[in-house]
Image (tube, rainbow, N blue to C red):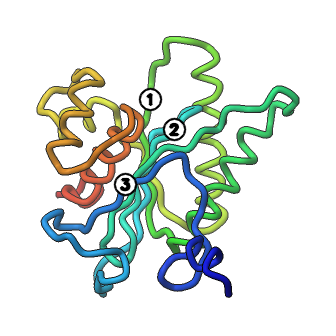
Amino acid sequence: MTNETKAATDVTGSPYIGVTRAHARTRNGDSELSAASVTPSAQAKSILALDLGTTTGWALRGFDGLITSGTASFKPGRYDGGGMRYLRFTNWVTEIDRLSGPIEAIYFEEVRRHLGTDAAHIYGGLMASLTSWAELRGVPYQGVPVGTIKRHATGKGNAPKEAMIAAAQSRGYSPKDDNEADAIAILHWALETQGGVA
């Protein structure tokens, strides 16, 4: 194995998945531990939180307690067919599961109203791809209403994007945009309310 190859693998030797941007920190947020020094917890489950869209925000709490987040773009290329966006998304979720999983639960932002028809179609396609992926593998999934996420993160159910970014920053994250901030908020909602049960 060359040094170049080592640089492109994680601590277990598995190759990293390509993402637009990622931010990692330990679960309690106070520690400066690297990913290699985090001790796995017997009770921790891999949980994936998603803000679905052309630029999908994601946050993952791994079985080791490490939280990573970022964004992934599913913008189709000029010569791509209509289904390529969804095929790439499904392959991306499969890679997340393979490299960081197994994913034991998925939470996503449940949007009931879109400002544009295209956004509604893209969201519906991504949600259908995600839920069918989860059904096929027996992974539980849950949509979380937008107002619930915003209220949990900021105290206001109609908080603007800037407030969501500020809420993520107050938890010690550096989100690239509101998509990543929303995914972080969804993940913390799921962890702190045990999926809305507590």
Q: Amino acid at mark 1?
A: Val
Is 130 placed left or right of 170 in the picture? Answer: right
Q: Mark 2 — residue? A: 52
Mark 2 surroundings: few (<14), some (14-19) or many (≥20) residues within 10 A: many
Q: Earlier in the sequence, mark 2 or mark 3?
A: 3
Q: Mark 1 — residue? A: 111
* Residue 133 in picture, x, y percent from top left: 64, 57
Q: Nearer the viewer, mark 2 or mark 3?
A: 3
Of helix, strand and loop, which one carries label 1? loop
- Which of the two residues, 197 or 120, is positioned nearer the viewer here? 120
Mark 3 surroundings: few (<14), some (14-19) or many (≥20) residues within 10 A: some
| Residue 23 tag number | 3
| Above/below status of 36 relative to 25 | below
Seen at 13% across and 65% down, the residue is: 30
Quadrant assignment, res 170: top left
Of helix, strand and loop, which one carries label 2? loop
Is 45 placed left or right of 101 in the picture? Answer: left
Quadrant where the C terminus sits is bottom left
Q: Nearer the viewer, mark 3 or mark 1?
A: 3
| Above/below status of 142 relative to 145 | below
Q: Amino acid at mark 2?
A: Leu
Seen at 30% across and 83% down, the residue is: 37
Seen at 67% across and 32% down, the residue is: 75
Say whether marks 2 and 1 touch (CB < 8 Å): yes
